């Protein structure tokens, strides 16, 4: 395993331990590598809205969490500066959603990440783009 992958995983472990919001929704961190993160979440009864579909806020939160783990995978603290989402297909009760975040561009203080949210069957549920901004600090102490 490369040093960069190991650092991405260590940064993710540190964030995961503090991220009660993500964990409380049953999200699972399936993969983290430099600039990449995959999270998944089941759609449960309390996430269904008046249309009988998954409330968009939960889908956004899954995509935002994947974005957060991807943009923080370089051991530099980052926060969201701007995000937008396009809902493509409704999520349904019983589905497991999978959000895959990938870095598109990373500069000294900002980055752009795209997240695709799919159903467990592979159907695209939403497309999300997040712009990150670095803030002071690291997740893992520097040697």
Image (spheres, helix red, strand yellow):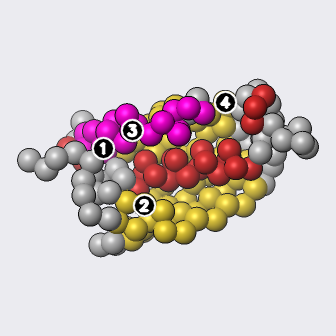
Q: Which of 73 and 57 is in front in this view?
A: 57
- Return the disc, 3 or 2, that comes first in the chain's sequence: 3
Kindly indicate whether the residue at mark 2 contacts the one at mark 3 (C-beta within 8 angstroms). no
Distance between mark 4 and mark 2 Cα atoms: 25 Å
Residues shaded magenta:
5-25
Q: In this view, does 110 lie above or below 119?
A: below
Whole-percent x, y for residue 56 in the image: 74, 50
The circle drawn on residue 79 is 2
Q: In this view, does 43 lie above or below 109?
A: above
Q: Which of marks 4 and 2 is in front?
A: 2
The circle drawn on residue 11 is 1
Residue lying furthest left in this view?
Answer: 143
- Return the disc, 4 or 2, that comes first in the chain's sequence: 4
The circle drawn on residue 42 is 4
Kindly indicate whether the residue at mark 4 contacts the one at mark 3 (C-beta within 8 angstroms). no
Q: What element carries label 2?
A: strand
- Give the labeled residue for mark 3: 18
Distance between mark 4 and mark 1 Cα atoms: 24 Å
The residue located at (64%, 65%) in the rendering is 84
Q: Nearer the viewer, mark 3 or mark 2?
A: 3
Q: Is mark 1 on a helix, strand or loop?
A: helix
């Amino acid at each position: 395993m490369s040093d960069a992958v190991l650092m991405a995983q260590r940064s993710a472990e540190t964030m995961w331990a503090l991220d009660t919001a993500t964990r409380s929704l049953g999200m699972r961190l399936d993969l983290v590598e430099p600039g990449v993160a995959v999270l998944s979440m089941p759609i449960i009864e309390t996430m269904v809205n008046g249309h009988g579909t998954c409330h968009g806020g939960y889908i956004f939160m899954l995509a935002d969490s994947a974005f957060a783990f991807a943009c923080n995978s370089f051991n530099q603290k980052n926060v969201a500066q701007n995000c937008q989402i396009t809902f493509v297909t409704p999520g349904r009760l019983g589905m497991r959603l999978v959000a895959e975040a990938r870095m598109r561009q990373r500069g000294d203080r900002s980055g752009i990440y795209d997240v695709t949210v799919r159903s467990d069957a592979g159907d695209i549920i939403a497309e999300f783009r997040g712009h990150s901004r670095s803030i002071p600090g690291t997740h893992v102490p520097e040697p």
